[in-house]
Image (cartoon, rainbow, N blue to C red):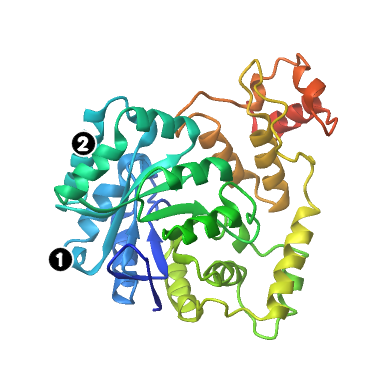
C-alpha cells in the first residue's frame, strides 16, 4: 500500500480508502454484515487505513456495522471518517446531538476526519447561520473530532467560497476522468490544494459506471502496452494527481477489495505515460458521443416554476445512455432528485409544459419533449 500526507494532518493516509456506502447486501436487502466485516478487515490487514462512512448510508445501518467491524483492535489501526447530515440540521444543538449519536453508533470516543456532508450553497448558508464553525471548533477542542472537512456538490465558485470560510483540513470532491470540470473539478482541486487542504476523492469510478466493459471503449483500452481493467484505469487516473491524498472506493464484493488493494500498489503521482493519458482522452471522446441531449448545464432555464431540476434530469438521462446502465442511473436519479439529500423532489414528471424554460434556453433545446423522454426512461 502507498501512503500520502495531508499538509494539516499528522498521519500518513493510504491512497485507497474504503467507502462504506455500497456494502454487500443479503437477500432481504440489508447489509450482509459477515461479508462486509470480512471485506473491511481484509482491506485494513492489507494496508488500508482510511475508512469512510456517513449517517444516512444504507438507511442508517452503515455506521453501526462499521463500528462493529472495527472491534477487536481494528479501530486503532485506522483513521475513521464520517459526516454530519447537513440537510437535517435545524439548530446548533442538533449538530452536537448527531455527532454524539454517531460516536455511539461507531463505538468510538473520537472521529478522526469529520465532514459536513454534501455541501451546496443552501446547506452552507444554513449551517453557517446556525454556527457550524463554532461547533467544529468546540468538537476539536473537546477531542470528539480531530480534523474538520466537508464533502461537496455544487459549482466551483461555491466551492472556493467555502474553502475560504474556515480553516479546513481537507475537502472531499467527486473527481474522475469524465468529471474534470464537474462541480469543484480540476479548478477547485488545485485551488484547495494551494490553500493547504488535503483532497479526498469520491466517485473515482463514477459509481461503478467507469468499470463497465463497454463495446467501443474496451477496444481503446486494449491499445495500451500494459493491460488493466477499466476500474484500474479510472483509479490510476485519479492517483496520478499529486494534489489527491485519498481515493475512496465504494466496494461491494470481496473481489473488488482484492483488486483495488493490488491496484493501489501502482498509484504513484505523475506515473501515467503520455500515451496512456491519450487513451483517457479517446475514451472520454467516445463516451461523450453517446450523449443524447446536448445540454451544457448553464441553468438559464431555471428556476422552473414547477420545480423541475432540468439540467440534472438531462445529466442522468445522458449518463444512463453513455454507460448503458439504465437501472443504476435510475436509482441515482430517484435519490438525488427525490430530496434524499435535502430539498424538494424535482423530477422531470413535474413538468407542466408551460414552455418558460424553452424561451430562456440559449441552445434552443426542445426541453419539454426531452423531459418527456426522461420520464419515459426513468418512470414517474
Q: Does 265 sit left or right of 326 as displayed?
A: left
As helix, strand or loop, the secondary structure at mark 2 comes to: helix
**Residue that label 2 marks:** 96
Counting residues from the start of the chain, the first of labels 2 and 1 encountered is 1
Of all residues, the one furthest to the right in this rendering is 364
As helix, strand or loop, the secondary structure at mark 1 comes to: loop
Q: Residue at x 16, y 53 (%)?
A: 108
Question: Residue 370's x, y, as percent?
Answer: 78, 30
Q: Image quarter for residue 41? A: bottom left
Q: Is residue 106 visible?
A: yes
User: Depth check: 330 or 337 in front?
Assistant: 337
Q: Does 138 sit left or right of 356 as displayed?
A: left
Q: Residue at x 34, y 51 (%)?
A: 53
Vertical side of 253 occupied by 126: above or below = above
Please count the marks in the image.
2
**Residue that label 1 marks:** 72
Q: Which mark is residue 172?
A: none
Question: Residue 95's x, y, as percent?
Answer: 25, 34
Question: Residue 87's x, y, as percent?
Answer: 39, 31
> In what quadrant of the picture does the N terminus appear?
bottom left
Vertical side of 217 occupied by 202: above or below = above
Please tell me how crowded label 1 is: few (under 14), some (14-19), or many (20+) other residues with Cα within 10 Å.
Answer: few
Please tell me how crowded label 2 is: few (under 14), some (14-19), or many (20+) other residues with Cα within 10 Å.
Answer: some
Amino acid at each position: 500500500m502507498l501512503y500520502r500526507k495531508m499538509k494539516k494532518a499528522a498521519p500518513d493516509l493510504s491512497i485507497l480508502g474504503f467507502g462504506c456506502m455500497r456494502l454487500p447486501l443479503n437477500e432481504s436487502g440489508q447489509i450482509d454484515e459477515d461479508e462486509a466485516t470480512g471485506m473491511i478487515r481484509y482491506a485494513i490487514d492489507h494496508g488500508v487505513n482510511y475508512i469512510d462512512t456517513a449517517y444516512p448510508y444504507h438507511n442508517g445501518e452503515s455506521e453501526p456495522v462499521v463500528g462493529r467491524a472495527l472491534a477487536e483492535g481494528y479501530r486503532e489501526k485506522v483513521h475513521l471518517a464520517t459526516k454530519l447530515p447537513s440537510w437535517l440540521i435545524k439548530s446548533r444543538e442538533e449538530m452536537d446531538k448527531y455527532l454524539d449519536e454517531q460516536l455511539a453508533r461507531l463505538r468510538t470516543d473520537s472521529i478522526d476526519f469529520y465532514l459536513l456532508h454534501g455541501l451546496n450553497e443552501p446547506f452552507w448558508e444554513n449551517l453557517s447561520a446556525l454556527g457550524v464553525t463554532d461547533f467544529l471548533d468546540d468538537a476539536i477542542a473537546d477531542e470528539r473530532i480531530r480534523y474538520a472537512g466537508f464533502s461537496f456538490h455544487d459549482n466551483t465558485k461555491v466551492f472556493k467560497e467555502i474553502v475560504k470560510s474556515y480553516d479546513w483540513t481537507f475537502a472531499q470532491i467527486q473527481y474522475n476522468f469524465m468529471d474534470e470540470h464537474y462541480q469543484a473539478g480540476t479548478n477547485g482541486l488545485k485551488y484547495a490544494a494551494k490553500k493547504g487542504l488535503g483532497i479526498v476523492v469520491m466517485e473515482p469510478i463514477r459509481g461503478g459506471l467507469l468499470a463497465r466493459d463497454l463495446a467501443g471503449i474496451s477496444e481503446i483500452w486494449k491499445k495500451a502496452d500494459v493491460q488493466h481493467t477499466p476500474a484500474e484505469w479510472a483509479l490510476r487516473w485519479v492517483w496520478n494527481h499529486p494534489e489527491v491524498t485519498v481515493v475512496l472506493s465504494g466496494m461491494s464484493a470481496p473481489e473488488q477489495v482484492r483488486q483495488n488493494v493490488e491496484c493501489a500498489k501502482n498509484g504513484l503521482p505523475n506515473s501515467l505515460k503520455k500515451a496512456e493519458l491519450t487513451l483517457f482522452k479517446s475514451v472520454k471522446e467516445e463516451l461523450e458521443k453517446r450523449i443524447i441531449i446536448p445540454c451544457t448545464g448553464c441553468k438559464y432555464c431555471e428556476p422552473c416554476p414547477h420545480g423541475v431540476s432540468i439540467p440534472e434530469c438531462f445529466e442522468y438521462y445522458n449518463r444512463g445512455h453513455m454507460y448503458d446502465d439504465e437501472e443504476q442511473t435510475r436509482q441515482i436519479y430517484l435519490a438525488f432528485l427525490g430530496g434524499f439529500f435535502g430539498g424538494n423532489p424535482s423530477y422531470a414528471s413535474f413538468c407542466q409544459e408551460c414552455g418558460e424554460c424553452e424561451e430562456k434556453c440559449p441552445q434552443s433545446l426542445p426541453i419539454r419533449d426531452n423531459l418527456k423522454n426522461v420520464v419515459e426512461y426513468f418512470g414517474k
